[in-house]
Amino acid sequence: MGKITGRQIWKTLHADLIGKDSQRGITLTYGWFANQLGHFALGFVPTSIAYILGVELKTALFSVACFWLAFEIYNASSPLYKKEYKGNGTFKPQWKNLTFDTFTDLCFFWTGSLTFYFIASTDKNGLYFFLAGLLPLFFFGRYWFLTKLYQQNAFFPYAFRLSQWNGRLKTEDADFIRHYLRQRPREAHHFIVSGAKKSGKTTITVGMANELAIRHNKTTYTTLSKWVSVLSDSQEELSRGNKSLWTWQESEFLLIDDINPGTPEEANKYKATDIESFINNSGYGDTIKQILGNTSVAWVVGSCSNDDGIRDWKEMLIRIGIPKEKITTIDLNSFQSGK
């Protein structure tokens, strides 16, 4: 699978920077830029105010820098004490990711403070070192801009990290999810996720997909009805009408949600054989099967009826060419503690 191109990055930058927010809304990439500009200002403005009030310039710089250092340490350690991030311990916070995010924010705080310091001082020698030190900000910005780009083009229904998971999950399922996310290179795998309403089917799969997006993998969230509606479209047709930088056919991880929302009595809209029929009758059956064979897919099947159980879904996937060993079932109706 190809990565995001420079042309696509430039197109997104142009869309983020040109146009009024009240007309086009806010994207994740724009939000990241605005956030870091705010960090820069929160370093620059307090340092300048302290200096204007008579605080010695270096003291003002040091005080503001230390304040934001203490604040970010407190902020980054929040998964230890904030319930909304802590989850139930099934999945641990990604401390490497958190540390890098914290350091990036600190660099923008400190850059703001240092910018005022060199504006107000005559320290020309230090200015050269400061300008050279700005170079890492480009690489930090490039990484985080791309990360937000991968996340926003997945079109997740909400933001969720696996470390926030507070539902119940079989130990072997949690272990396999961790194993799958750690794979290098990652092999295509299919997940059949079942469970009753509000059991966390969408949440756990969105968490998996988001972890992959943060690792710069092309992921796509869609519902079954939307996916079925484009099965008969060619790649060219998909590209013309797609709002994302990639189509579902170009994704490395495809999340198909709302196959059977609710219980069988409430809504059992599609069976495994229906999906197979949609693929075979699309006009691109062989191509779709080949794509699915090379793509990781999470099938959020919901509550299966007696005449359409998990076994039927496994058999359907095998019939369209998915190896049996590349299919994993996650049943949220039957679990043990995930700790």
Image (spheres, grey):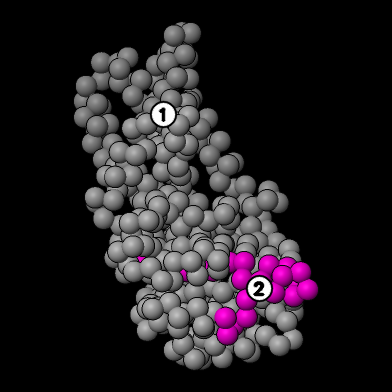
Q: How many marks?
A: 2
The secondary structure type at the circle numbered 1 is loop
First in sequence: mark 1 or mark 2? 1
Q: Of 205 and 140, which appears nearest the observer?
A: 205
Three-letter amino acid code at disc 1?
Lys
Mark number, residue 269:
2
Question: Is residue 170 at least partly visible in the picture?
Answer: no
Q: Is residue 258 left or right of residue 107?
A: right
> Residues in magenta?
250-274
Q: Is residue 167 magenta?
A: no
Q: Quadrant of residue 51?
A: top left
Assign the C terminus to one quadrant of the image.
bottom right
Q: Is residue 240 left or right of residue 178?
A: left
Question: Is residue 153 at least partly visible in the picture?
Answer: yes
Three-letter amino acid code at disc 2?
Lys
Mark number, residue 20:
1
Q: Is residue 195 above or below residue 273?
A: above
